[in-house]
């Protein structure tokens, strides 16, 4: 991820109607960062000095288990926030953050935000709502892993990772290493994942071909996910 001085934050502020949260005099203090699909944006233990607001693209947030396996916490679309908890508590980054697609973030320094917090109550309200939503999402993801079968978790993953955000189509390399990683994401074994994928294929929900997975029946997939999306 890198700062892009050619980008102006104002169009994003207007697009998402953020003028109430970030007043006109504050916007020039914000920076614009761009990132590419696959970029590791933040890592556990990293110290943040800025809060980031996702305005384009999608990112995934995951954690490592004591066994070294990766588990998805959630996905974020605009207007997801990174650094809110770190700003409030002053702690370092806990989870890994990786780009699912190319995207853009707005950034504001903690120092500037502290001044805004003292003088602009709407920002405090925004921060409260953001942190509350984050803890709710993490609770949902935890429940999803503990209470729901692999079929539901996998359907939820497919809906969350779809390239257009609507569950229509996404490409997932079908090499063994990537399927092993996918099994880790949804908390199951490689062999059981293959059984579930085969069942979803025979049910007409997905199609595996030429190194990709195509969603054939979006309504069936949503029904299987039962509203439990990693977002």
Image: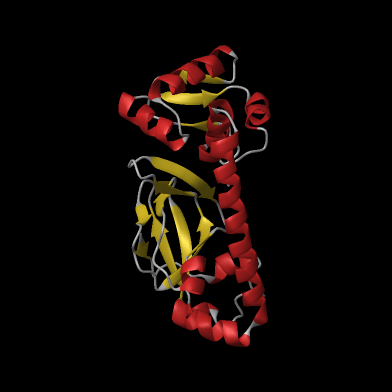
Residue at 63% x, 76% y is 124
Give the left or right position of residue 155, taking residue 44 as reference: right
Q: How is the image coloured?
A: secondary structure
Marker count (numbered): 0
Q: In which quarter of the image is the N terminus?
A: bottom left
Residue 84 shows up from this direction: yes
Q: Please determine whether, in this image, residue 173 is positioned above or below residue 51.
A: above
In percent of width and height, residue 185 lies at 44, 37
In percent of width and height, residue 169 lies at 53, 31
In percent of width and height, residue 92 lies at 39, 66
Give the left or right position of residue 154, taking residue 47 as reference: right
Classify residue 143 by image quadrant. top right
In percent of width and height, residue 101 lies at 44, 46
Classify residue 33 by image quadrant. bottom left
Residue 163 shows up from this direction: no
Residue at 62% x, 27% y is 221
Residue at 39% x, 55% y is 35
User: Closest to the observer: 7 or 50?
Assistant: 50
Q: Residue furthest top?
A: 202
């Amino acid at each position: 991820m890198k700062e892009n001085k050619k980008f102006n934050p104002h169009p994003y502020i207007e697009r998402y109607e953020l003028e109430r949260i970030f007043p006109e005099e504050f916007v020039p203090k914000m920076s614009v960062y761009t990132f590419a699909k696959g970029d590791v944006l933040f890592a556990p233990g990293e110290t943040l000095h800025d809060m980031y607001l996702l305005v384009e693209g999608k990112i995934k947030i995951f954690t490592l288990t004591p066994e070294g396996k990766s588990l998805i916490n959630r996905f974020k679309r605009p207007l997801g926030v990174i650094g809110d908890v770190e700003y409030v508590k002053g702690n370092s980054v806990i989870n890994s953050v990786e780009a699912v697609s190319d995207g853009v973030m707005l950034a504001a320094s903690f120092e500037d935000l502290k001044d805004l917090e003292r003088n602009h109550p709407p920002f405090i309200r925004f921060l409260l709502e953001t942190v509350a939503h984050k803890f709710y999402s993490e609770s949902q993801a935890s429940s999803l892993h503990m209470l729901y079968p692999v079929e539901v978790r996998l359907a939820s993953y497919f809906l969350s990772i779809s390239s257009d955000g609507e569950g229509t189509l996404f490409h997932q390399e079908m090499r063994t290493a990537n399927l092993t990683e996918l099994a880790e994401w949804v908390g199951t074994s490689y062999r059981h994942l293959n059984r579930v994928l085969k069942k979803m294929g025979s049910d007409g929900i997905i199609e595996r071909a030429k190194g990709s997975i195509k969603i054939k029946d979006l309504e069936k997939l949503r029904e299987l996910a039962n509203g439990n999306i990693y977002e």
